[in-house]
Amino acid sequence: MAEVVPVVSYARISSDGRGDEHGVQDQHKVNRATAGRLGWTIVHEFTDNDKSAAKANVVRDAFEAMVKALRAGRLADGTPIEGVVIVAEDRLARRPGDYERFVEAFTYRDGRVFADARGPKDLYSEDTESMGLFGAVISKMEVRKMQRRMRRSHRARAEQGVPVGGPRPFGWLADRVTIHPEEGPLLREAVDAIIAGGSLRAIVMKWQQLGVRTTRGNEWSRRSLRATLSSPRLCGWREINGELVRDADGNPVLGKWEALITPEELLAVRAAFERTSREKADQYAALGMRFDQREHRYLLSGILRCGKPKADGTGICNAPLRVRPARGGVHLYVCPAPSDGGCGGVGRRGDRVDVFISELVLAKLDESPDADAEDVPWAGEQELKDKKEQLAELTRQWNARTISNELFFMLVPSLEQRINELRREGQAYTAAKERKRSRRIVDGADIRRRWYLPEDQGGLSMGTKRAMVMEAFHAVIVHPVGKGMGSWGNFDPNALEPVWRED
């Protein structure tokens, strides 16, 4: 009776588009036939499905487990292994380092067998090992050439405005061009809400209640919604690897699909998100305020400041008041204890303070300029146009060899820097203008009525109302009016000192 030679089968495929593992299963089928032809018995199948062997950051778990088993001479359950069967060496390794690790583990013990679909090979032979290593090097070079060709192809398609591949973008049909009749309006509504000061949390909660899912079938989160609402695709701009694709004149390339919003609205959305960035935190710190990125449940948390004088007479406490729930559903705004950075000497009934400050904000909105007032044009528009023309002219002269390299590279950096500065200024101006336009629309929709309505009944979100409050005030200082718990019930509007923002 012939001696049984226990071997393992290894199969790998880089991309399993259908997700049914048909590619790796076909390889194992070929490996079983090869082993049977040679009189070997496959005792285990190692499978790396949908995993590249060319990328350094991809861990092939099955490959690593096979290398470990080869060095040990047995599987995890103790079954001995004396060889490996594969379809082809490019399934085994595409990086020289991986091939060397495999051969080192394979030859750690003598007498092992190895074969691919064409037949057995002697990995103990230096010539065979060298040819295998050389093949891995060639394979790696081919992979790099293919990756470069793909990058060039993607760049060319991006410059032509061709839609990107991958999963269907939310908001568009499967053709990636036509706006989805249900998802499109949802995105449009979400954009308007964010520009008006609404919160991601409120939109996500609403979509979850409606059963709205991503195109992959997942529930929406604040992270995924923010990424979607920040995407240049919404306004028709083309992006590749996080970079906006521009034409020869520096203008964004328009994609060949229907746009949902305007570029100005996209900039306004991004500006709304950037208000929670470190730059905004620094601005608050300059005012002696701590910027809190949490989505608040109460209108004035973090906005009210303690106005109790310090004992040494050097000023007021100025600590932000915190919310303390009280009986009967009434919340209290209180100064934190000294151990938490406050003085503990000021407190107010939150419902009465909220109504008083709300009325101040609503009165301020009633005094806002007419919605049809003419917008003042951005002062840097002409300078940006002139600088872009200068850069284009310099580039044309340099390409025509009418100016020297030295002169060209001396002038261009400062010109490009100024263009980038003007672009940022223009984007900030556009975002602010769009925000004002959106706010006027909200103002015209009976804002007073919506202010006091619950959000699920068409009322404004807490994020929108807080944004309006913070546009009206830097802070509201709460001065002490008496001693003890009874002072919370004695509402005195004169003890509230709004610190208005300048128009």
Image (spheres, grey):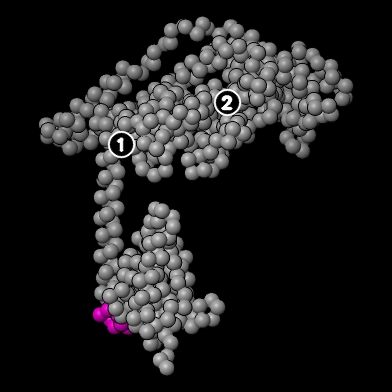
- Between 403 and 291, which is closer to the camera in this rendering? 291
Whether 218 is among the magenta residues is: no
- Amino acid type indicated by mark 1: Val
Proximity of marks 2 and 1: CB atoms separated by less than 8 Å: no
Residue 385 place in picture, x, y as percent: 29, 21
Between circles 2 and 1, the one closer to the viewer is 1
Disc 1 is placed on an element classified as: loop
- Amino acid type indicated by mark 2: Gly
- Between 305 and 17, which is closer to the camera in this rendering? 17
Q: Measure the alpha-carbon separation of dots 2 and 1.
A: 33 Å
Whether 125 is among the magenta residues is: yes
Residue 79 place in picture, x, y as percent: 51, 81
Left or right placement of residue 372 versus residue 55 in this view? right
Disc 2 is placed on an element classified as: loop
Left or right placement of residue 481 versus residue 240 in this view? right
The residue sitting at 44% across, 55% down in the picture is 19
Residue 420 lies in quadrant = top left
- Between 187 and 271, which is closer to the camera in this rendering? 187
Q: Quadrant of the C terminus?
A: top right
Report crowding for label 1: few under 14, some 14 to 19, many 20 or more residues within 10 A (C-alpha): some
Q: Which mark is residue 500?
A: none
The residue sitting at 38% across, 87% down in the picture is 111
Q: Quadrant of the N terminus?
A: bottom left
The residue at which mark 1 appears reads as 162
> Which residues fall within the magenta stretch?
121-128
Report crowding for label 2: few under 14, some 14 to 19, many 20 or more residues within 10 A (C-alpha): many
Decide: is 159 above or below 357. Answer: below
Decide: is 136 above or below 375. Answer: below
User: Is any atom of residue 470 visible in this view?
Assistant: no
Residue 499 place in picture, x, y as percent: 64, 17
Q: Which mark is residue 198?
A: 2
The residue sitting at 46% across, 78% down in the picture is 43
